[in-house]
Amino acid sequence: MVKAAILGIGTVGGGTAEVLAKNRELIARRAGQEIELKYILCRSPRPGHPLESLIVHDIEPIASDPEVGVVAECMGGLSPAFEYVSRCLSAGKNVVTSNKELVAERGLELTALARKMGVNFMFEASVGGGIPILRPISQCLAANEISAVYGILNGTTNYILTEMIQRGKSFEQALREAQEKGFAEADPTADVEGIDAGRKICILADLCFGKNVPPSAITTEGITHITPADIACARTLGYKIKLLGRAMRTGPNSVTAFVAPHLISQSNPIANVDGVLNGIAVRGDAVGEAMFFGPGAGALPTASAVAADMIDCVRDPGTRVYAGWWPSEKGYVTGPDKLSCRWMVRTAAPLAEIAAAFSGVRFINAPNAAADEYAFVTAYMSGEELAEKTAGMDVLAKYRVLD
Amino acid sequence: MVKAAILGIGTVGGGTAEVLAKNRELIARRAGQEIELKYILCRSPRPGHPLESLIVHDIEPIASDPEVGVVAECMGGLSPAFEYVSRCLSAGKNVVTSNKELVAERGLELTALARKMGVNFMFEASVGGGIPILRPISQCLAANEISAVYGILNGTTNYILTEMIQRGKSFEQALREAQEKGFAEADPTADVEGIDAGRKICILADLCFGKNVPPSAITTEGITHITPADIACARTLGYKIKLLGRAMRTGPNSVTAFVAPHLISQSNPIANVDGVLNGIAVRGDAVGEAMFFGPGAGALPTASAVAADMIDCVRDPGTRVYAGWWPSEKGYVTGPDKLSCRWMVRTAAPLAEIAAAFSGVRFINAPNAAADEYAFVTAYMSGEELAEKTAGMDVLAKYRVLD
């Protein structure tokens, strides 16, 4: 029997306690021993909570209890999560976390600390919620040189876009409804501006390419500016607009990572990842492209990943630190501006101006398009080239096309 | 440094040798030591083969060489693969295999032998080729009670169906072209009759539900009878016809497993797994539904999975036997006849006969349908109930609808 602690009793922490209780026997069988929840750290008192007897308000009883073998950090945010996780790792505890901000910002130090202490630090739940993705990348694709990883990494924005695409809602209306349903926070900035997806693409890039990609080094573009007219143009082409996080190797010692809305062909399975689901694709030199879909958030799906990490920690102590990654040099992460792709452009410019700037665009005749607008798809060009060609032009919208 | 042997130098064996050579440095980094290929077992001489110097014709030099730490079986077939793998496991070697027939038929004994010997026996490549699926099920979803697993498990039939659906080809024409392109064997029986998919759903059921599901206990229906008229009816409904392997828990000590063509909604991401790709979905009580897509066959994708297993064996010797499974009692596996679902039926029966047999069917008006035929979707009912209702009726085709 090993004792466990959960830090935080919100959605994910509560879900983890529920899964540990509900599937107790099955988990014991798979972990090789029972995992018994001994502590829940919760900074405020919770009178009447069904697990009230386990609640402590400080990290020390947990970190200093020799019975505790594994700690699940489900608080979110950087502080005090970082201090608590560091304290537990330093005390020789295995730690698992669902906290993407923590892993994206401080994962480099925390994986190094875990290696130094000979304990596990695992964070499957930090990307893609319940979708198995980090372990498959680290283990199942370990024989591959990975060239690119991309995907729908944020369920809130995918829900909003799905409502806009399937039911013709405006961004504002879809956001309001998502907030009413609990799929979006009162302050939705981190989701709708692509910040949350940015943290996740950083973690994926860290693991896929082996060096640190800090969130501050990448550009993120959100979905607030997407209009029903943009969506109609995409549909006419047989595409959907989806918010993608993307990271790709661009040289022996450089990667590009960014978040931006993309046009994605309806024949790509990722285009059919709708609602709050997430979908992630990984390209490797041996495997080609492998894709992973599922619930990217929610109490039980995320708890599924947290509990799986706890099982793994307990079953093979000391062996399962994810590969970890190394510090990166200045200039390792580059923005997407040099990345060549096709673009969908919607503009109020007169035809003569478009013809003067571009050769060989493909016009889109979306039904109900405004009479004084043109929409078209360009040839392959970088963002810089597009900016040059459209300098001074009245551009209403532009999106990368994923090919 | 650890020495390795590959049994068989066909598509997968050759691909594995190629991946080990090509990504040698990266593999050494991830495995914690170099993996050097020392032997290739090939029963016939291969004069002029680039790896000729490594070729041996018998298992004994490999099994008795104390330098060999890991053996990759890529021969296919039951014999002598079973004898060779048993010999290597008994000699204390870690063994990985891509051989689905071997794992489906003899996996119960081989995992038990590996456990007894304290070595690893891994077979990620035996299902879904390069797609990470068995390890995610065993590890990432370990906290879940799994209720069902299903998917497109055979690339050859999926290629044929995709050609029929997208280009209106007949089964015969699509099969012939698949054979010309090397996607189907000269004798395509194992693929087109669902036997190959059957082996894979058995392995998935073994791992998901913990007890042995022998291929002889399941029913398999193939794709040879699917016609363009069936496909047109499905399309009119917004569905595609795909060959699915399915296994689900039906009681505390019973599972249903089978292979059959199904109608699957185009809004299900699995419906867009086209060509030679495979796609697998797993339902768990915590995660909900997670899906895994990618190349289900081919030299390098399959080698990607074989090499990943080799890395895992070498990195953590003795810890990575897949959970394994237990013998099953008589009656544990039941056929799909009691499974309730909607059905698409195409029939030459007169309307009065249909009306007498069914209440509340939904008729399908496929373009260009034959004037003397009806196609419709039934309410939920079991295969037994459907057989009763259509007894004596001139049924041209019937398919389960996946909901």
Image (cartoon, coloured by chain):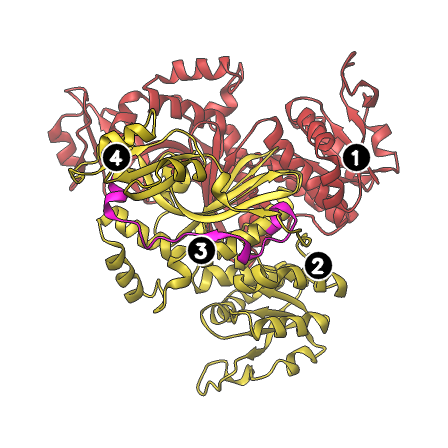
Chain colours: A yellow, B red
Residue type, label 1: Arg
- What whole-number distance in Å separates the C-alpha atoms at marks 4 and 1? 60 Å
Q: Residue at x 54, y 68 (%)?
A: A20
* Residue matched to label 4: A236
Please tell me whether mark 1 or mark 2 is closer to you in this view: 2
The chain under label 2 reads A
Within the image, what quadrant is residue B342 found in? top left
Residue toward you, B313 or A277: A277
Q: Earlier in the sequence, mark 2 or mark 3?
A: 3
- What whole-number distance in Å separates the C-alpha atoms at marks 1 and 3? 44 Å
Disc number at residue B87? 1
Residue type, label 4: Thr
Residue toward you, A65 or B78: A65
* Residue A69, visible in the rendered structure: no
Task: Locate residue A100, reporting x and y percent.
Answer: 53, 61
Please tell me whether mark 3 or mark 4 is closer to you in this view: 4
Q: Earlier in the sequence, mark 4 or mark 2?
A: 4
Task: Locate residue A375, reporting x and y percent.
Answer: 26, 36
As displayed, is residue B325 above or below residue B361?
A: below
- What whole-number distance in Å separates the C-alpha atoms at marks 2 and 3? 27 Å
Please tell me whether mark 1 or mark 3 is closer to you in this view: 3
